[in-house]
Amino acid sequence: MNEQLLKQFGTEIRLAKVKYGETQTSLAVKCGLSDRTIGLLESGKIKNPRTMTIAKIVTVLRLDPNKWLPPEGSLPPEEVVVTLQHRLFEDYAARTGAFSRQRLKVITTAVVEVVVEIIEERYAIKVDSDKITSVITRYLNKLDG
């Protein structure tokens, strides 16, 4: 991302945080990132943010993915699954007003199985399910702490 886009992304993060009542800390927890990373992104100081980092923020803050993410099909399959999982968690939380770790484990298992199957069939590539499970487990652990 060039410097102008980085600043624009930071501005959109700040505006969306206000719009959705998020703080740096609450956004960081929901994205599985640190407060410091969110702050650096807001100020445009991270010159080459990871695609997954951008995808998490775009998902949580409901930013336009077409503006900030590479074209569909260019994300590694594991990142696609984790992004879909994160969206599912957010939807579940919005509908129920709470997270139940046991329910999230069930949702996680179902989503990983279905999405991995779809990705492997559609793109004829092998997806690392263990890596996906590891990332989702880290995300769930952040909810506990």
Image (spheres, rainbow, N blue to C red):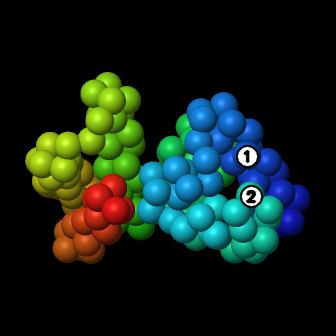
**Residue to which mark 1 is pinned:** 14
For residue 93, above or below residue 113: above
Residue 70 percent coordinates (x, y): 59, 57
**Residue furthest toward the right?**
4
The answer to the question of whether label 1 and label 2 lie on touching residues, with beta carbons closer than 8 A, is: yes
Judge left or right: residue 96 versus residue 6. Answer: left
Local secondary structure at mark 2: helix
Judge left or right: residue 104 versus residue 78. Answer: left
Identify the mark at residue 51; answer none if there is no mark: none
Q: Looking at the image, can residue 123 be seen?
A: no
**Residue to which mark 2 is pinned:** 42
**Closest to the observer, 73 or 3:** 3
Q: Residue at x 33, y 56 (%)?
A: 143
Q: Quadrant of residue 7?
A: bottom right
First in sequence: mark 1 vs mark 2:
1
Separation of residues labelled 1 and 2 (CA atoms): 7 Å
Which amino acid type corresponds to the residue marked 2 in the rendered image?
Glu
Judge left or right: residue 55 versus residue 95. Answer: right
